[in-house]
């Protein structure tokens, strides 16, 4: 059992990089002047605030703030569409793991690289490998083959200097922090019940818009307040906008490995922007495994795009749920069953919001592509995603909020039944009909995603090219066949 | 707040944080291995299939026994009976081999997919049936080749040559399937190996393992979509059709292919043609009588197809080395401007040296009892004869050493100096192999046959001596390379001991032969 747990953990590590380790760079460009000369204090004004709305969307929201301040008018959902995350989903089903991973949580480095390349943005990504979190993050970057600037290798390139340099240059700086140390009341839940973040945990992205060396404070915009009960809702009171001391910032930043991404204007949008984006989205929807996890395509525990939904639908059976529960001790089985239902609903709700928002944004991003048929096909998924989603699932605090949804009722009912009967087979079989219904929704989503992806692909009218090396192989094969035939003929005549 | 466990959003990260670095590596290895099994199985089955098919053919070609057949046919044994008898005789030998190998293919699946007992039995059954069909196919091929080759006056030699040539036929597709299939896959959008019966068998085994194991339906779906271009029913149909066709054609062709069943074997008399320009050149360079001995020795070696086949095989293996270094699995891992030339030179030297033992070891005195008897009576006849042999082999060794060395230098873009040094190194090792090979044979003459005990002992002794010499030479070269950091000097230093010691062995051999009686 221990080995099997390791296996699924590794799959998830490979797939998921933490929310606030978003970027990769191809080259280590030096953005710092030889001698540092910073203002004593600097403030970037006019940065629009973007609320992340949904747990898990902090990074696109922070990015939206940075980009809008640079004059690139991209909303949260524009970014979810242009990065393909709104149209992406992964399932992991092996051993004690049975879960969805919505687009924003899957392979963040590759999708962010794609996004920055699409818009021709300059990216510089930093972390500090001397911290436990940074060291762990560096290994994840290694898996994706991404380069980063390591603070621990330089005496002059420090987190605070990068912050000063970026803000002096007029670019707000997005960083990853541990919410445990952040002042807003929303994070009391972390302070009171969870504790500081562990290496490998998911950090939180915030944006620094100003600093003051005299008062030793920074001014930040926090996209993530107002997400969890009892503070759910847009933070009208302005608690997203606050200052904190360098000391508090250092605690929060260090705990998240000093992960920093500095983004600035680059070469500008690529010329074939629309074709490239449309193709990318079509492959994410269809579930092209190379588009999701290149080099790991044969990891059959992972489902991608439409196949993620179809695979999870296929796993809504007695045998598969029994296999999932088998990996837990008897006493932990009810909680495992509840967590399965809850987690599926949480992830589905996140993706539902991302998908719906991204669909709305797409026509503005792809104005010259005829999207009528695509929108029609893709909209087929919405009602089924809605049936498996509920906002209460993503606003739950310490206590899971009860709700009247098919996923909640089925799995919580199943757990309760097992607790009273201690017969797992019977407890699962009791909900066969509900499981069929859930599977039906998942299959319908899979069909809609596949059809939408194929429609978009067809719209592009791409003619597949034969690779040069394949042509060489054909020619070599034909020549070999000719030689063999000639030798046989000659041999037959002579013998 | 992103991803803290209280709302279940990213408990995955929490799990991930609990594992240590070491266990991570072990787990990752296990996960990667499990996910690659269907592909690995295709490669394993291809290698086993080719082995079970080619090795019996190769072995039987070593000894073409048409005379034996003619005796059988004269006693009203039908060709069909002969075919069936050979097949039944082979089943136990190669059957044991397959039984020993089958668990290697099956047990990883049992471990990774938790295949049921029924599933395991089914997998063994499929392997058994496939092995039987392959042995049958191999029997048909080898018997047909026997019949065709036996009709030739140089049947035995041709058979031996073919037995060597068949090995690259096994190696090429196996290596190709391992390293160079991706572009073909991109072209056809399905695995090109689907045309191979071994792939059908491997895929059927994977199917059985998947469906009788404890994989979840989602995993089965992903496996199917990634690995399998066609359904298992088509695989089964293809394999069944292949088996039936092979069985039918084997029986059907028995009476048509093997004309020995109905008519007595015919004999063709070989005729000597005029000497070519090269042989005439050799005669002229070495002058008069000595030139005749060298030319005769050269013709003795090169007229035998089996020698040419061995040379070609050695060249093939040597040429594979730069291809593997440049384009194989380590191409991306190692890309060092010093390491590549050093490794290429050493590997090429090792390969050519060891194989020169196979090519030249033991052959020195074959079919030469009469010549030696005559030469023994002449003044310094034996040394002259042996030196002539050595000189002719040295001529043969030039293309054998230089072609792969120049090819390597060209393919891997070496500097001219490095390429020249490599040529010198490889040729000196080959020379060492020739000297040792002829010297050992002179000490322990084998005049009769390549399957005689003395021949085999001489060949093995030559290979061992050359290997030990090369290892000793390379060690001192490596020490110099590490201490001085000079590539050229270390290569040159490594190239000296093998031919020098080889000359000593050769001299001792000549002395021994000179004093021995030719019986």
Image (cartoon, helix red, strand yellow):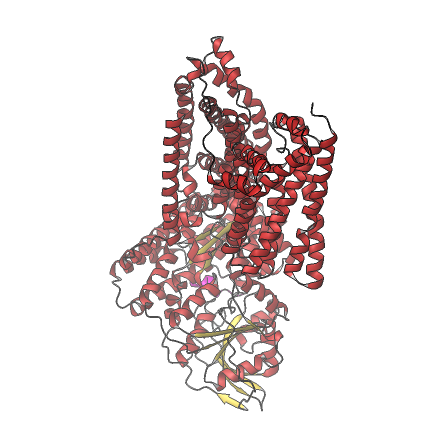
Left or right: residue B271 compared with residue B504: left
Residue B209 horizontal/vertical position (percent): 51, 37
Nearest to the observer: residue B196 or residue A72: B196
- Tell me, yes or no, whether the highlighted magenta stretch contains residue A465: no
Q: How many marks?
A: 0
Residue B513 horizontal/vertical position (percent): 71, 32
The residue at the point 50 percent across, 39 percent down is B280
From where the camera sits, is residue A494 visible?
Answer: yes
The quarter holding residue A66 reads bottom left
The residue at the point 44 percent across, 34 percent down is B197
The quarter holding residue B393 reads top right
Measured along the vertical axis of the image, is residue A35 above or below residue B176?
below
Nearest to the observer: residue A408 or residue B34: B34
Residue A26 horizontal/vertical position (percent): 48, 69
Nearest to the observer: residue A123 or residue B68: B68
What's drawn in magenta, residue-wise? A390-401
Residue B115 horizontal/vertical position (percent): 54, 37
């Amino acid at each position: 059992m221990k080995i099997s747990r390791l296996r699924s953990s590794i799959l998830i590590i490979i797939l998921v990089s933490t929310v606030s380790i978003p970027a990769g760079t191809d080259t280590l460009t030096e953005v710092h002047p030889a001698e540092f000369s910073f203002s004593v204090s600097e403030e970037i004004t006019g940065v629009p605030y973007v609320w992340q709305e949904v747990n898990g969307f902090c990074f696109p929201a922070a990015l939206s703030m940075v980009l809008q301040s640079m004059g690139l008018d991209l909303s949260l959902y524009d970014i979810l569409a242009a990065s393909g995350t709104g149209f992406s989903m992964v399932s992991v089903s092996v051993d004690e793991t049975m879960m969805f991973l919505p687009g924003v949580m899957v392979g963040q480095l590759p999708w962010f690289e794609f996004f920055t390349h699409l818009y021709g943005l300059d990216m510089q990504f930093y972390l500090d490998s001397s911290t436990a979190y940074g060291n762990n993050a560096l290994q994840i970057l290694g898996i994706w083959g991404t380069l980063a600037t390591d603070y621990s290798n330089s005496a002059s390139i420090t987190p605070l200097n990068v912050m000063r340099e970026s803000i002096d240059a007029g670019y707000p700086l997005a960083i990853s922090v541990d919410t445990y140390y952040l002042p807003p009341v929303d994070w009391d839940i972390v302070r009171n019940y969870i504790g500081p973040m562990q290496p490998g945990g998911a950090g939180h992205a915030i944006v620094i818009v100003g600093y003051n060396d005299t008062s030793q404070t920074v001014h930040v915009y926090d996209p993530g307040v107002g997400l969890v009960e009892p503070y759910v809702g847009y933070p009208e009171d302005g608690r997203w906008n606050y200052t904190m001391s360098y000391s508090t910032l250092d605690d929060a930043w260090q705990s998240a490995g000093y992960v920093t991404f500095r983004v600035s204007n680059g070469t500008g949008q690529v010329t074939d922007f629309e074709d490239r984006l449309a193709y990318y989205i079509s492959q994410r929807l269809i579930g092209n495994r190379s588009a999701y996890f290149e080099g790991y395509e044969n990891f059959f525990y992972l489902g991608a795009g439409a196949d993620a939904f179809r695979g999870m639908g296929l796993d809504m059976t007695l045998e598969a749920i029994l296999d999932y529960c088998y990996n837990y001790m008897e006493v932990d089985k009810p909680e495992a069953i509840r967590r399965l239902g809850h987690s599926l609903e949480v992830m589905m709700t996140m993706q539902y919001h991302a998908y719906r928002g991204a669909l709305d944004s797409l026509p503005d991003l792809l104005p010259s592509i005829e999207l009528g048929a695509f929108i029609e096909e893709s909209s087929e998924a919405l009602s089924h995603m809605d049936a498996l989603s509920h906002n209460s699932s993503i606003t739950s605090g310490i206590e899971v909020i009860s709700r009247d949804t098919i996923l909640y009722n089925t799995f919580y009912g199943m757990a309760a039944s097992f607790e009273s009967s201690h017969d797992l087979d019977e407890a699962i079989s009791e909900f066969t009909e509900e499981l069929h219904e859930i599977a039906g929704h998942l299959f319908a989503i899979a069909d809609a995603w596949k059809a939408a992806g194929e429609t978009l692909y067809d719209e592009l009218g791409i003619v597949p090219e034969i690779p040069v090396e394949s042509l060489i192989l054909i020619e070599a094969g034909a020549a070999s066949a000719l030689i063999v035939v000639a030798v046989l003929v000659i041999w037959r005549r002579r013998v | 707040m992103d991803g803290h466990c209280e709302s279940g959003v990213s408990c995955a990260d929490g799990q991930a944080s609990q594992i240590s670095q070491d266990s991570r590596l072990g787990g990752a290895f296990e996960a990667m291995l499990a996910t690659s099994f269907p592909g690995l199985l295709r490669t394993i089955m291809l290698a086993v299939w080719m082995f079970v098919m080619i090795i019996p053919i190769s072995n039987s070609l070593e000894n073409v026994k048409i005379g034996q057949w003619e005796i059988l046919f004269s006693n009203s044994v039908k060709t069909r009976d002969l075919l069936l008898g050979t097949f039944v005789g082979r089943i136990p030998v190669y059957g044991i081999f397959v039984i020993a190998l089958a668990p290697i293919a099956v047990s990883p699946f049992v471990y990774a997919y938790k295949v049921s007992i029924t599933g395991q039995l089914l997998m063994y059954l499929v392997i058994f049936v496939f092995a039987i069909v392959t042995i049958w196919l191999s029997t048909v091929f080898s018997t047909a080749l026997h019949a065709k080759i036996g009709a030739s006056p140089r049947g035995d030699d041709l058979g031996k040559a073919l037995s060597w040539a068949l090995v690259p036929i096994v190696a090429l597709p196996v290596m190709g399937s391992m390293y160079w299939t991706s572009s073909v896959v991109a072209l056809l959008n399905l695995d090109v190996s689907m045309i191979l019966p071994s792939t059908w068998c491997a895929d059927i085994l994977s199917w059985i393992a998947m469906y009788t194991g404890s994989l979840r339906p989602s995993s089965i779906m992903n496996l199917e979509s990634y690995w399998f271009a066609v359904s298992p029913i088509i695989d089964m149909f293809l394999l069944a059709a292949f088996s039936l066709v092979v069985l039918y054609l084997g029986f059907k062709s028995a009476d048509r292919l093997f004309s020995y069943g109905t008519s007595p074997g015919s004999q063709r008399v070989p005729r000597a043609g005029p000497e070519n320009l090269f042989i005439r050149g050799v005669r002229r360079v070495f002058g008069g009588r000595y030139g005749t001995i060298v030319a005769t020795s050269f013709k003795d070696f090169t007229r035998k197809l089996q020698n040419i086949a061995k040379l070609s095989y050695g060249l093939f293996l040597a040429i594979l080395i730069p291809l593997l270094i440049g384009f194989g699995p380590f191409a991306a891992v190692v890309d060092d401007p010093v390491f590549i030339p050093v490794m290429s030179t050493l590997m090429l030297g090792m390969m050519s040296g060891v194989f020169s033992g196979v090519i030249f070891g033991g052959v020195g005195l074959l079919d030469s009892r009469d010549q030696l008897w005559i030469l023994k009576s002449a003044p310094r006849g034996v040394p002259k004869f042996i030196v002539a042999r050595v000189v002719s082999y040295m001529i043969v060794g030039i293309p054998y050493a230089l072609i792969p060395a120049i090819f390597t230098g060209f393919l891997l873009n070496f500097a001219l100096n490095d390429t020249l040094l490599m040529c010198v190194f490889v040729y000196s090792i080959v020379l060492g192999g020739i000297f040792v090979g002829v010297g050992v044979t002179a000490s322990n003459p084998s005049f009769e046959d390549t399957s005689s005990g003395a021949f085999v002992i001489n060949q093995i002794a030559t290979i061992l001596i050359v290997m030990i010499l090369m290892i000793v030479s390379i060690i001192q070269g490596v020490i110099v390379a590490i201490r001085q950091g000079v590539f050229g000097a270390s290569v040159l230093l490594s190239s000296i001991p093998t031919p020098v010691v080889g000359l000593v062995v050769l001299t001792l051999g000549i002395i021994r032969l000179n004093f021995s009686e030719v019986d």
